Amino acid sequence: MNFLEERILKDGVVREGNVLKVDSFLNHQIDISLLEQIGAELKKRFANKEVTKILTIEASGIGIACIVARYFNVPVLFAKKSQSVNIDGDKYSADVYSYTHKCMNHVFVSKKYLSKDEKVLIIDDFLANGAALLGLTEIVHQAGAEVAGIGIAIEKGFQDGGKIIREKGFKLESIAIVDAMDASTGTITFRK
């Protein structure tokens, strides 16, 4: 059992509807020392890949992406979910359905921050159905850039996202893969 699986068992909460709450340490209140471990682990798993930029989606992937970027010594770019007055110029965009929030998001990044020469490592906190990752890979492809890989903290292995992403040929590394959860008992089973 790895450090993230141990932390999930200690502080994660399983709720009805296949919800795994890790907001006490990962995506609401953030344990920075845990993020440091995640960053080091993802650096190790992608050590053989050239990475020039980290890409994530707003908001809960940003913290992890920043730590990972420090290990690679590259900038972080995050796809925004809403237009603001300080975003100008051309954008790459994709529509991404959020299963957590039950809505469609039109996400985008400014073209001036993503070029065809980039080798992009996509980072996120969770992988369930894969919609966010597919949207981010679409944005990378619109730029003519290369997806160097995809790093995830927690993958729900009992949902289709990981299978879809792997079948598309992407190098996907998830630190913890949950194969089953039972809200009535609080039991969590990890992939070996």
Image (cartoon, grey):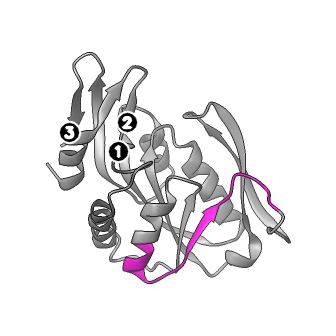
Depth-wise, is mark 1 or mark 3 nearer the camera?
1
Residue 33 image-quadrant placement:
bottom left
Q: Is residue 149 visible?
A: no
Q: Earlier in the sequence, mark 3 or mark 2?
A: 3
Q: Residue at x 68, y 34 (%)?
A: 103
Q: Residue at x 43, y 21 (%)?
A: 17
Disc 1 designates what residue? 24
Is-magenta flag for residue 76?
Answer: yes
Residue 9's disc is 3
Residue 72 image-quadrant placement:
bottom left
Amino acid type shown at disc 2: Lys
Q: Earlier in the sequence, mark 1 or mark 3?
A: 3
Q: Are marks 1 and 2 in contact (CB under 8 Å)?
A: yes
Between 81 and 148, the one lying in front of the other is: 81
Q: Is residue 183 visible?
A: yes
Residue 14's disc is none
CA–CA distance in space, label 1 to label 2: 8 Å
Q: Are marks 1 and 3 in contact (CB under 8 Å)?
A: no
Residue 21's disc is 2
Q: Does dot 2 land on a helix, a strand or a loop?
A: strand
Q: Does dot 3 land on a helix, a strand or a loop?
A: helix
Q: Position of residue 37 (x, y in %)?
A: 26, 65
